[in-house]
Amino acid sequence: MAKAGLPYKIHYDPTGTLRWLLYKNEKAEVPLLLFIHGAPGSSSSFLPYLKNERLREAYSILIVDRPGYGYSSYGDYQPIPIQFSTIQHILRYSGIDSNVVTIGHSFGGTIAGYMAIQNPDWLKGTIMIAPAIDPKQEKYLWFGKLALYKSTRWLTPRSIRVAADEKYSHEDELKTFIADWGRIRIPVLHIHGDADGLVPYGNVAFSENNIPNKWLEIKTFENKGHLIPFTEHESIVDEIIRFVSSLKTTSGE
């Protein structure tokens, strides 16, 4: 259904367990921007980008509720490979099979990076914003365990519970594909604030040491923290437009 006042539609898969927002640009063959939110979060996190006239003028835009968040099987976290296959399902269901640029923030940046490793035919480029990709850089906060312990889990909102489930499985999940980053064969832009207190800036070094230099670009936001997609909205829009404009029609060796 269409959202009043905006030209995007809300979609559900036939089972009603997956939800996404899709704006289709009337221009033919324009790239599609696929936004992937972090944790906790939902598709609503990126609504300001759906409303951005500069992006709507140049691109189609797809924003997903990742499995476990928003209106997609809320409260039931799924591992990274299933997140990837679920998003592929959404793309197929939407009739999208090429010219996609992923834009993921935080744990969503991890998913975007995992997609780049898999190198599906539909993927043209990847933007990872403050991605948590280095298992050695995982940062744990004591109060996060409140959502894990049976005695206190009931006190926390479901969004926090699923975020905790993701957080405390994340390090082990990252280790399962830590040797695979060198397989990337598409352009990747890693954006990170050097004052990020949640996902340390050291994740940039991981990208530099593991993603082939040919495909990697680093953009540092000086004195900025973890929420740069929202605190630095226009600057991120600038980076998206610049990066997508730089992509070739096809990627390859």
Image (spheres, helix red, strand yellow):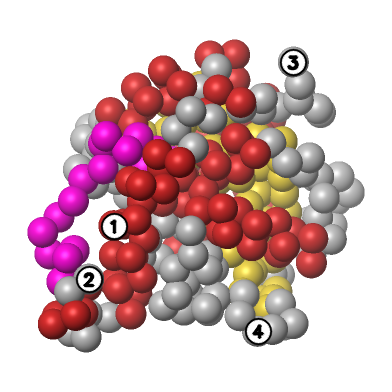
Q: The residue tagged with tag 4: helix, strand or loop? A: loop
| Marks 3, 1: nearer the viewer | 1
Q: Is residue 70 magenta?
A: no
Q: Let me know if residue 155 appears in the view.
A: yes
Instruction: Please identify the quadrant where the N terminus is shown.
Output: bottom right
Residue 93 at x, y = what percent? 79, 67
Which residue is label 4 attached to? 16
Quarter holding the C terminus? top right
Task: Say which residue appears at 68% left-offset and 78% top-offset.
Answer: 12
Q: Report the amino acid beneath label 3.
A: Glu
Q: Where 22 falls versus 3 (above or below)?
A: above
Q: Nearer the viewer, mark 2 or mark 3?
A: 2
Question: Which is more foreground, mark 1 or mark 4?
Answer: 1
Residue beneath disc 1: 168
Of 225 and 71, nearer the camera is 71
Task: Kindly identify the amino acid type of the residue bearing the numbered disc 4.
Answer: Gly
Which residue lies under the disc numbered 2? 148
Hey, which quadrant is residue 10 in on the image? Answer: bottom right
- Is 175 displayed left or right of 136 in the figure? right
Q: Are marks 1 and 2 in contact (CB under 8 Å)?
A: yes
**Which portion, as a residue range, is magenta?**
129-146
Q: Kindly identify which numbered label has been placed on residue 157.
A: none
Left or right relative to 91: residue 229: left
